Amino acid sequence: MELRDLPSVDELARVSSDPLAVAAARSVIDRAREQIRAGRDPGDLGAAFASELASARRPAFRRVLNATGVIVHTNLGRAPLAAAALDRIAETARGYSNLEYDLAAGERGSRQDHVAGIFGRLTDAESAIVVNNNAGAMLLALAALAEGREVLVSRGELIEIGDGFRIPDVLARSGATLVEVGTTNRTRAADYEQSARPETALVLRVHQSNFRVVGFTELPPLEEVVAAARAHDIPLLDDLGSGALLDVFDEPTVRASLAAGADLVCFSGDKLLGGPQAGIVAGRADLVEKLRRHPLHRALRIDKLSLAALEGTLQLYLDPARAMREIPVLRMMHADAASVRARAARLAAATGGEVEETVSRVGGGALPLAELPSFACAIEESLAGPLRAHDPPVVGIVRDGRLLLDCRTLADDELDEVAAAVSEARCH
Ligand SMILES: *Cc1c(COP(=O)(O)O)cnc(C)c1O
């Protein structure tokens, strides 16, 4: 092809008034011009135009097939939702809802009223409030309970969660003053007692989500910190991070933390709970009420889609066996290795790959040391890029010169899609 053979933008876009089509035609022709100048064949311009236009029309934010084996993958959207939760979103968001309307009284209500009751049933919490995420929950709790006063935190718990989110920074933004107690590796209940003063507003415990200190270490059991805080009449907030509602491995549960005497606990909705992005603060009603009335509550409030999904997820927990079956995060965590291996074998047979033993992770800052035995389908490393460019994209893990598609985070009904993506990626 010569430069003079190139079609005009209008010819390629078929005299379209669609600005996306015109832009796609222009970029295909520009690229072809450079290729011709470089002495290369620009290929089928019609096909290039069709694929350019298709990708311009495709949403930027879309579904991805997670073959990384990391169950709560923050970059891939954390917890996939249960079908029941999705149904609640569709039903309440399609039309109007009683989001902030008290149907019995016929007057204004609070969006917080919809889930406070079910949290009470699931955790024995007196009251609860739900905001946008757990970082927001912490900020709100610290601002409402400790602004202008002091908060005691163990040096071993002044952590960075990820993406630069650091506990001391959030604390500073809340207007409270951090008082460090103990040392990085060892903190005792007596350290809290020694630092308690009339200016102390709160004791904050933070779950060491994404790391562990090993060796010469000491962290007092929650009961001892509670006793120290109570001796000085200081409330205790326990940031559980993930916040399990059921016993999963050795993660602390919300119920256990409240039973041990925490006045408030806060945790995420989209980590081990397996629901939508949300931050929940549960515990003493008088303290929760202070959070509700604080001006930051309005800025951090949960939106109605998340609230619907959260209630749909919590309802599944009323029957723990059903929660284990239907909440994807719990189902993937508890899937036995044999069923994961069977999926890997199916995928290997469909793609000509090999079954490879590997380990999955819970992710999301929960259980950093827990390794879940898993199986992957191993294929050639060169497919990693083409699979990410596929629609839907497939994201795996590159290891030792091969691409591993971990089957713990792939559902049965996603295997055919992955196999089709692999064969298309090999054609390019
Ligand atoms: C993840 C985490 C947070 C932040 O939760 P988001 O819901 O991501 O805002 C806060 N504290 C701890 C201990 C965590 O693990």
Image (spheres, rainbow, N blue to C red):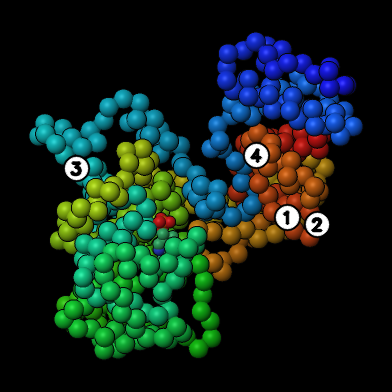
The image quadrant of residue 240 is: bottom left
- Circle 4 packing at 10 Å, graded few (<14), some (14-19), many (20+), is some
Q: Quadrant of residue 200?
A: bottom left
| Pointer 2 or 3: first along the chain | 3
> What is the CA distance from the residue labelled 1 to the residue labelled 4?
15 Å
Residue at left offset 20%, top offset 37%: 100
Q: Earlier in the sequence, mark 4 or mark 2?
A: 4
Between marks 3 and 4, how big is the CA–CA gap?
40 Å
Q: Is mark 2 in CB contact (under 8 Å) with mark 1?
A: yes
> What amino acid type should be assigned to the residue bearing mark 1?
Val
Could you classify mark 3 by the number of other residues whose Cα lies within 10 Å: few (under 14), some (14-19), or many (20 or more)? few
Is residue 223 visible in the rendered image? The answer is: no
* Residue plotted at (31% across, 61% down): 139
Q: Which amino acid does the dot numbered 4 rest on? A: Pro
Residue 401's disc number: 2
The mark nearer the N terminus, 3 or 4, is: 3
Question: Residue 110's mark?
Answer: 3
Q: Which mark is residue 398?
A: 1
Q: Secondary structure at mark 2?
A: loop
Work out whether residue 157 can be spotted: yes
User: CA–CA distance between discs 2 and 1?
Assistant: 7 Å
Measure how far apart labels 2 and 3 are at the Cα level: 55 Å
- x%, y% of residue 192? 29, 84
- Residue placed under numbered mark 4 in the picture: 393
Gap between marks 3 and 1 measured at Cα: 48 Å
Mark number, residue 101: none
